[in-house]
């Protein structure tokens, strides 16, 4: 106890509602204590608020039929910040600060980006989107942070679709500061023995995928990770596992005594990881649930 399932990168639109329902239906067989979604619930910039809420509704409807429903947690991914230009300036921030947390509350989900932690027995579940601060950039590509900001539009769609007064490094810092507060609160709680960290953006080098000779992929690495957040997490000894999404490229490694994974979701085929925190997570099997 507790038994935890985490999915990510559902990208409704690429993934059909039918597939989402099958995944959740499959997970209801697991008698979960915690179910979490690690961001990128949506795909289409025009309908982020509606699609985000729809995924939460589909999950909540099914899990509430469980004899003992799991606690539900959600955090956003970069796609869940995509603006609807018909709704005026600053819409990305409005999604993050207002519309998505409200959707979470409407369907009984804990919005991890604003909470210190969710407690289940002696385990704290905490996290946030993480964002990227270019600290995961490929060391073999001689570009500085200024270059990655100025050329972002040529590499990743986030630049075009996120509006408002935006700075990746500033926002990543905001996420890191919030995580530090959450980790400190959980560490100081005598009831908490283990911490589970969930982020959308990977935070450890061991979660990154470096592809030798693939320039386009490797230059994108600046937007795929937040390694300064990982450095922070390593300072908190109660952290036993860190699970992330975003790259859609599965990873499973051990960093010190922290197990760390990236959920191997694919467009159209989201996956979920399941583990039990009563086990030694450095060696315990982590099941991958797929519904192809
Ligand atoms: Fe994604
Ligand atoms: Fe993402």
Image: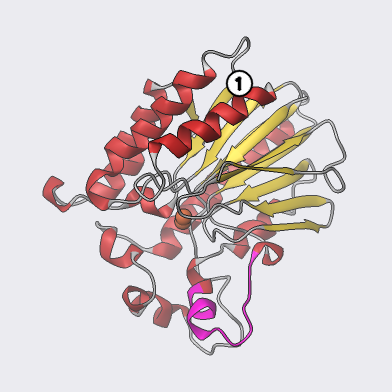
Quarter-wise, where is residue 146 in the image? bottom left
Labels in figure, total: 1
Nearest the eye: 19 or 94: 19
State the residue position of label 1: 70
Residue 23, located in which quarter of the rendered image? top right
Taking the image as shown, residue 188 lies to the left or right of residue 267, namely right
Q: Secondary structure at mark 1?
A: loop
Magenta-drawn stretch contains 251: no
Residue 43 on image: x %, y %? 35, 51
> Does any portion of residue 111 appear in the rendered image?
no
Give the camera-side residue of 214 and 269: 269
Give the quadrant of the N terminus: top right
Q: Is residue 6 above or below residue 282?
A: above
Task: Give the farthest residue toward the front.
Answer: 292
Q: Position of residue 286 (x, y in %)?
A: 76, 43
Badge 1 density bin: few <14, some 14–19, many ≥20, Cα 10 Å: many
Q: Over which residues does the magenta segment extend?
A: 208-220
Residue 283 percent coordinates (x, y): 87, 47
Q: Is residue 213 magenta?
A: yes
Position of residue 169 in the picture relative to residue 235 (left or right): left
Q: Is residue 105 visible?
A: yes
Viewer-proximal residue among 204 and 170:
204
Report the coloring of the rendering: secondary structure
The residue lying at 86 percent from left, 35 percent from top is: 279
**Residue at point 44% right, 44% down?**
76
Q: Residue 17, position in %: x, y?
A: 39, 36
């Amino acid at each position: 106890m507790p038994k935890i399932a985490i999915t990510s990168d559902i990208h409704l639109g690429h993934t059909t509602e039918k597939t989402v329902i099958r995944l959740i239906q499959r997970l209801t067989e697991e008698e979960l204590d915690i179910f979490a979604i690690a961001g990128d619930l949506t795909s289409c910039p025009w309908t982020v608020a509606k699609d985000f809420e729809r995924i939460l509704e589909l999950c909540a409807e099914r899990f509430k039929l469980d004899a003992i429903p799991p606690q539900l947690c959600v955090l956003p991914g970069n796609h869940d910040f995509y603006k609807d230009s018909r709704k005026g300036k600053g819409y990305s921030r409005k999604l993050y600060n207002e519309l998505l947390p409200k959707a979470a509350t409407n369907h009984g989900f804990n919005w991890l980006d604003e909470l210190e932690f969710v407690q289940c027995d002696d385990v704290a579940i905490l996290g946030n989107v993480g964002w990227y601060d270019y600290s995961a950039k490929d060391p073999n590509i001689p570009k500085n942070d200024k270059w990655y900001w100025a050329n972002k539009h040529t590499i990743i769609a986030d630049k075009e679709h996120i509006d408002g007064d935006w700075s990746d490094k500033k926002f990543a810092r905001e996420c890191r500061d919030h995580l530090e507060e959450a980790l400190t609160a959980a560490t100081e709680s005598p009831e908490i023995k283990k911490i589970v960290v969930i982020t959308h953006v990977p935070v450890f080098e061991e979660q990154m995928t470096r592809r030798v000779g693939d320039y386009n992929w490797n230059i994108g690495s600046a937007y795929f990770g937040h390694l300064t957040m990982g450095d922070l997490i390593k300072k908190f000894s109660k952290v036993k596992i860190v699970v992330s999404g975003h790259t859609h490229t599965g990873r499973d490694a051990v960093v010190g005594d922290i197990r760390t994974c990236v959920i191997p979701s694919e467009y159209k085929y989201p996956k979920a990881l399941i583990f039990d925190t009563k086990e030694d997570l450095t060696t315990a099997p982590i099941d991958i649930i797929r519904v192809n």
